[in-house]
Amino acid sequence: MTITHLLLDIEGTTCPVSFVADVLFPYARAAIPDFLNTHGQDPEIQQLANDVESAWRNDSSTEAVALLQVCQEQQGAARVAPYLQHLIDRDVKLTALKDLQGRIWRSGYASGTLVAPLFSDVAESLQRWHQEGFTLAVYSSGSAPAQQLLYGHSTAGDLRPLFSHWFDTRIGSKQEPASYSAIAEQMKAAAQQVLFISDALSELEAASAAGMAVLFSDREGNPGRDSGRFERINDYRRLNPAHGPE
């Protein structure tokens, strides 16, 4: 079946891991207490804080339990700030944390403090694929609004119009085949029509199990360079999605 849709991860795939780990995460980590103090009365923020609190109380790790004991007398949304910072340090993919990070990054992008670097081949490849009629979509553990902020404030300008769909962990874990089946269904495509590119073997295994074609993104600076059983790619200018890497 011919590929008609491209589903792309972000970190380590279109954007360097270093930007996320060394710029975005520290920016959000530092801003979380003030953000929660300032916006803690917002019903949406209160609900997110409640979701974090629930995850915290169900987290049996030694660090989480110790933090909970230290912070048990505190009140308000900002009470969960230390636990959120702990999750950032551990790179835990909690949906409520990803939502809050996206809201914090919005001000950084708006002020020009944050500008997302893309690998040098990415912008022209996205534009070519779009012009050739492929449907482009994003699937990242970062929230959909955070994804749009990144592509809307990239070193190549605003690339958001090139994408038709934005998926985050609200549709499911990136390690579960059912998530990719749900994504294909939402895009009104057969799984076999979708090519998924990621730097994470567990994600490629899940997408492949769902029936998608997959490629391993092998980029300088990525923590994992083992492509396992999958074909690798490090320059999207070589990729004709209908036929694979040239």
Image (cartoon, helix red, strand yellow):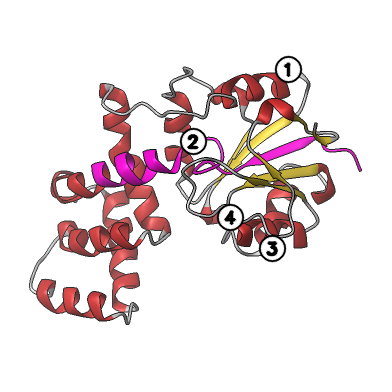
Which disc, if any, is residue 15? 2
- Left or right of 52, for residue 210: right
- Using the image, determine if residue 72 lies above or below residue 85: below
Task: Residue lying at the far right in this picture: please name it.
Answer: 1
SS under mark 2: loop
Q: CA distance from mark 1 to mark 4?
A: 28 Å
First-in-chain label (1 vs 2): 2
First-in-chain label (4 vs 3): 3
Mark whose residue sits in front, 3 or 2: 2
First-in-chain label (1 vs 4): 1
Find residue 83 and report its horizontal and vertical position in percent.
Answer: 23, 65
Rate crowding at label 4 as few (under 14), some (14 to 19) or many (20 or more) other CA atoms within 10 Å: many
Residue type of the residue flagged with mark 4: Ala
At 61% from the left and 29% from the top, the residue drawn is 163
Mark whose residue sits in front, 1 or 2: 2
Bounds of the magenta span? 1-27
Residue type of the residue flagged with mark 1: Gln
Q: CA distance from mark 4 to mark 3?
A: 17 Å
Residue at the disc numbered 4: 200
Image quarter where the C terminus lies is: top right
Q: Nearer the viewer, residue 50 or 25?
A: 25
Residue type of the residue flagged with mark 2: Cys
Which disc, if any, is residue 11? none
Q: Are marks 1 and 2 in contact (CB under 8 Å)?
A: no
* 21 inside magenta stretch: yes
Find residue 77 and report its horizontal and vertical position in percent.
Answer: 19, 58
Residue at the disc numbered 3: 178
Rate crowding at label 3 as few (under 14), some (14 to 19) or many (20 or more) other CA atoms within 10 Å: some
- Left or right of 29, for residue 197: right
Residue type of the residue flagged with mark 3: Ala
Which disc, if any, is residue 131? 1
